[in-house]
Image: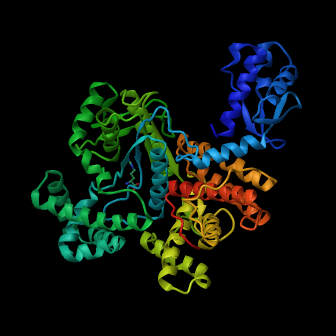
């Protein structure tokens, strides 16, 4: 066990059991990071009442027992009964050496492994993917990678919007401009122009509006020619999304498409089942569900609409069908929806209805991993100067161009410079999304995201690149050397080693609430500890044993950084 908190937890439990009796072998050791030592245990305070002794009367003898453990250098009682614990250098060094030998870098596989749906990205057909979609895409993809690394079975679900009344006007517009011209526009990402042109005609031209309405009916009734046109439209847009996914290094493929239309054949049956269960009722001609606890401002119960009075189905119905399909047919244990926070009410209502229907329960849980807003300098939603939403592909290009400026002086070879700029620019953009809590808003400011210092993608990539260059200077391949063993001579080495041991916990912490920023924060602290180490501890010029130990610390840091960034979907350039 190389996780210090878990290892200490076991040692404290053993000490509690020895001091207080076997009944306490499962007590919570309440290990927390401490400002005075490596960790503290607050268990004595929690148990005092139950045991009938003062906290200090428990803490004293427990601390004595802890001191006897080989893993512990010092255990001292402080204040009302805290036990401050300093780990033994030998334990830290030995654990770090073991972590370096471990193919999983000290990350234990999840127990039990679950089957998890992650619903993310989900742009809309014939509508530009905007910065908000960038965020759900990047965060969702990181969550997926972490879950898979831990051994969970993950079903990626790209719930794209490919259905609805607006398709009438879009299809009529497609016919007007011609199939090839539409393809050229859409595949090039001129999606907003396409959509706007259709909308303008719809608003201005009654004949076009009428054609559009007839086209919706034809689409819904499965008219073959209309279906063919619709498929073209969907395919053209997907072409563009796929280009973006590829540029970003996102793991979504066509196999992960679970568009709204996929659920069409299930909608009638879902409505029938909810009605038969008594969860849905007819209200003013529409089939509605009124989940308990949701009320409008005036206090009246708030519905989700499952079937409109004209027989049409909408976004709510599709999502109900998706929950039933995922839980019943796919048999998943957990559903994570990585979607903008403006849909919070939608998801809490459909989850509530799904619980009423018995599709969700304490065993099969759904959660909305809310995504905050990406803002511009003015603090408002990020837009172009002219007020339109920004083309994602433009944003990606800008990130890379700017990254190239940052590294311009270092590379003469334009080919190589461009390649590194790709990794740095995209890394900066993604890390900007992943380093802040997913539900908070953040300002997209390229200067900040691309800074080589601070909590940025480039800073982390740079730390890894520095380590590679140490090995390169020594003529060694970091993947194929087993230096070491690790021993800890200085505070900087000790701090770095102890930090590295937290990797497993940091990875695990991402999964509890789908929060990649927890891993990002860990990686930043690791890179910072490495920077201090690098400034204070010569590696290649050190004496033989010290050199071996420091090279081992470098190798471990490199692996943790590269693996950790990889879990966030960020690549590390060979050089920087
Ligand atoms: N297409 C939707 C949008 O752009 C997001 C869909 C999210 N997933 C879902 N199952 N509702 O807002």
Which residue, as the protein is rendered here, is positioned at the far front?
Answer: 544
Q: How is the image coloured?
A: rainbow
Q: To which quarter of the image does residue 116 belong?
A: top left
Q: How many marks?
A: 0
- In the shown orientation, is residue 113 left or right of residue 500? left
Q: Nearer the viewer, residue 346 or 82?
A: 82
Q: To which quarter of the image does residue 407 belong?
A: bottom right
Residue occupying image coordinates x 72% and y 33%:
31
Residue 143 visible, this orientation: yes
Q: Position of residue 434 (x, y in %)?
A: 56, 57
The image quadrant where one finds the C terminus is bottom right
Q: Position of residue 419 (x, y in %)?
A: 48, 76
- In the shown orientation, is residue 311 left or right of residue 531? left
Residue occupying image coordinates x 61% and y 42%:
505
Q: Position of residue 418 (x, y in %)?
A: 49, 79
- In the shown orientation, is residue 91 left or right of residue 188? right
């Amino acid at each position: 066990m190389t996780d210090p908190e878990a290892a200490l937890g076991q040692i404290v439990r053993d000490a509690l059991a020895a001091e207080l009796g076997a009944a306490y072998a499962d007590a919570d050791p309440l290990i927390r990071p401490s400002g005075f030592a490596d960790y503290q245990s607050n268990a004595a305070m929690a148990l005092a009442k139950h045991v009938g002794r003062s906290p200090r009367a428990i803490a004293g003898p427990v601390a004595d027992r802890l001191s006897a453990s080989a893993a512990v250098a010092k255990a001292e009682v402080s204040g009302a009964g805290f036990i401050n614990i300093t780990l033994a250098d030998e334990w830290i060094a030995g654990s770090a050496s073991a972590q370096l030998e471990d193919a999983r870098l000290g990350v234990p596989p999840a127990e039990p492994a679950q089957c998890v749906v992650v619903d993310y990205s989900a742009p809309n057909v014939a509508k530009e993917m905007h910065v908000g979609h960038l965020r759900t895409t990047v965060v969702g993809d990181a969550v997926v990678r972490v879950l898979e690394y831990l051994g969970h079975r993950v079903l990626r679900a790209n719930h794209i919007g490919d259905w609805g009344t607006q398709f009438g006007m879009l299809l009529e517009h497609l016919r007007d401009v011609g199939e090839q011209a539409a393809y050229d526009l859409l595949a090039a990402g001129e999606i907003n122009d396409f959509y706007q042109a259709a909308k303008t005609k719809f608003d201005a031209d009654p004949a076009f509006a009428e054609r559009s309405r007839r086209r919706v009916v034809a689409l819904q009734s499965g008219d073959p020619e209309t279906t063919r046109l619709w498929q073209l439209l969907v395919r053209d847009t997907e072409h563009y999304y796929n280009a973006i996914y590829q540029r970003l290094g996102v793991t979504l493929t066509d196999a992960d498409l679970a568009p709204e239309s996929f659920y069409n054949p299930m909608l009638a049956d879902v409505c029938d089942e909810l009605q038969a269960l008594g969860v849905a009722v007819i209200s003013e001609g529409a089939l509605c569900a009124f989940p308990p606890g949701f009320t409008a401002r005036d206090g009246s119960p708030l519905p989700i609409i499952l079937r409109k009075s004209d027989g049409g189905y909408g976004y709510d119905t599709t999502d109900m069908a998706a929950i039933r399909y995922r839980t019943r047919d796919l048999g998943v244990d957990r559903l994570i929806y990585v979607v903008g926070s403006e849909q919070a009410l939608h998801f809490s209502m459909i989850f509530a209805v799904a619980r009423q229907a018995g599709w969700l329960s304490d065993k099969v849980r759904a959660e909305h991993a809310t995504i905050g807003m990406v803002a511009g300098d003015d603090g408002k939603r990020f837009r172009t100067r002219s007020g339109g939403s920004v083309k994602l592909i433009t944003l990606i290009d800008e990130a890379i161009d700017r990254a190239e400026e940052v590294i311009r002086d270092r590379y003469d070879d334009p080919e190589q410079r461009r390649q590194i700029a790709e990794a740095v620019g995209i890394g900066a953009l993604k890390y900007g999304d992943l380093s802040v809590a997913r539900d908070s808003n953040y300002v997209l400011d390229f200067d900040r995201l691309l800074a080589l210092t601070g909590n940025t993608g480039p800073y982390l990539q740079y730390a890894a690149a520095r380590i590679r260059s140490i090995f390169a200077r020594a003529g060694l391949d970091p993947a194929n050397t087993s230096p070491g063993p690790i021993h800890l001579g200085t505070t900087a080495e000790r701090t770095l080693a102890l930090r590295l041991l937290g990797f497993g916990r940091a990875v695990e912490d991402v999964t509890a609430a789908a929060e990649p920023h927890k891993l990002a924060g860990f990686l930043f602290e690791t890179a910072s500890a490495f920077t201090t180490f690098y400034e204070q501890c010569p590696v290649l010029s050190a004496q033989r044993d010290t050199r071996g130990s420091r090279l081992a610390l470098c190798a471990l840091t490199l692996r943790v950084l590269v693996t950790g960034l990889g879990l966030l979907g960020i690549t590390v350039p060979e050089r920087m």
